[in-house]
Image: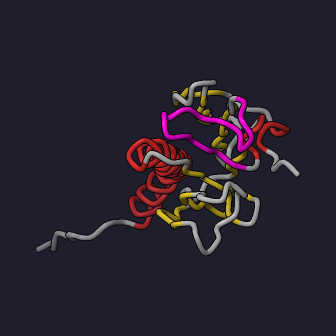
């Protein structure tokens, strides 16, 4: 009488492992793109939320509120504070309202006048410390520049809008 075997042959096992290897090699890059996209979405949410918070606080408090990069670098994060002495520095008379940072993205850079600070007056308009409108954009660049990044654009009256954009490497390099 012949016994029936319930196991796998070596050939069947090797074919199964080869198929598993192919599926993993296809799935991992897609998963990596998915993670990068999620990080970009999180970074956009954090920055957008902070900008809107800055504007709302300026209106609610009826005084200027400033959002500044930590140590001059938006990649490190930012502080939002009431700038009572209009010197663009968090001092003893100023009130720190928020400190935050973007999720892990390749870079957060600012263009135009936003490289140093974002300031809203009591009317909710973006303005420079000594008058004049303040406009520009923040760029959120993904680690893989083949993917689209995000631009958060602040117009001359302080309104925020977002766009999905393809950036070049030079646009994502940190500004001096």
Q: Is residue 132 left or right of residue 156?
A: right
- Could you tell me if residue 27 is visible in this image? no
Q: Position of residue 156 (x, y in %)?
A: 63, 24
Q: Residue furthest left?
A: 1
Q: Is residue 125 left or right of residue 23?
A: right
Of residues 65 and 10, the one drawn nearer to the viewer in this rendering: 65
Residue at (59%, 52%) from the top-left corner? 66
Which stretch did the figure color magenta? 117-132
Q: Is residue 14 left or right of residue 88?
A: left
Residue 124 falls within the magenta-colored stretch = yes
Task: Locate residue 145: give its quadrant.
Answer: top right
Name the magenta segment's main secondary structure: loop
- Could you tell me if residue 94 is visible in this image? yes
Q: Position of residue 170 (x, y in %)?
A: 85, 38
Q: Is residue 128 left or right of residue 12?
A: right
Residue at (60%, 57%) from the top-left corner? 83
Residue at (76%, 60%) from the top-left corner? 72
Q: Position of residue 99 (x, y in %)?
A: 52, 65
Q: Against 107, is 93 above or below?
A: below
Q: Against 166, is 43 above or below?
A: below
Q: How is the image coloured?
A: secondary structure
Q: Residue furthest right?
A: 176
Residue at (56%, 30%) from the top-left corner? 158
Of residues 158 and 149, the one drawn nearer to the viewer in this rendering: 158
Residue 163 falls within the magenta-colored stretch = no
All told, the count of numbered labels is 0
Where is the N terminus found, in terms of image quarters?
Answer: bottom left
Of residues 27 and 149, the one drawn nearer to the viewer in this rendering: 149
């Amino acid at each position: 009488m012949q016994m029936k075997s319930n196991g796998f042959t070596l050939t069947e096992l090797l074919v199964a492992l080869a198929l598993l290897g192919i599926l993993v090699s296809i799935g991992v890059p897609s998963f990596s793109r998915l993670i990068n996209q999620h990080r970009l979405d999180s970074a956009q949410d954090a920055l957008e939320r902070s900008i809107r918070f800055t504007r709302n606080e300026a209106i609610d408090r009826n005084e200027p509120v400033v959002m500044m990069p930590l140590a001059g670098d938006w990649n490190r994060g930012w502080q939002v504070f009431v700038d009572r002495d209009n010197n663009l520095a968090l001092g003893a008379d100023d009130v720190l309202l928020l400190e935050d940072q973007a999720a892990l993205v390749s870079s957060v850079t600012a263009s135009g006048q936003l490289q140093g600070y974002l300031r809203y007056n009591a009317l909710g308009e973006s303005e420079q410390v000594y008058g004049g409108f303040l406009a520009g954009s923040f760029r959120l660049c993904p680690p893989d520049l083949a993917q689209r990044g995000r631009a958060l654009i602040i117009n001359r009256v302080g309104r925020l809008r977002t766009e999905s954009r393809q950036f070049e490497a030079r646009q994502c390099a940190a500004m001096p």
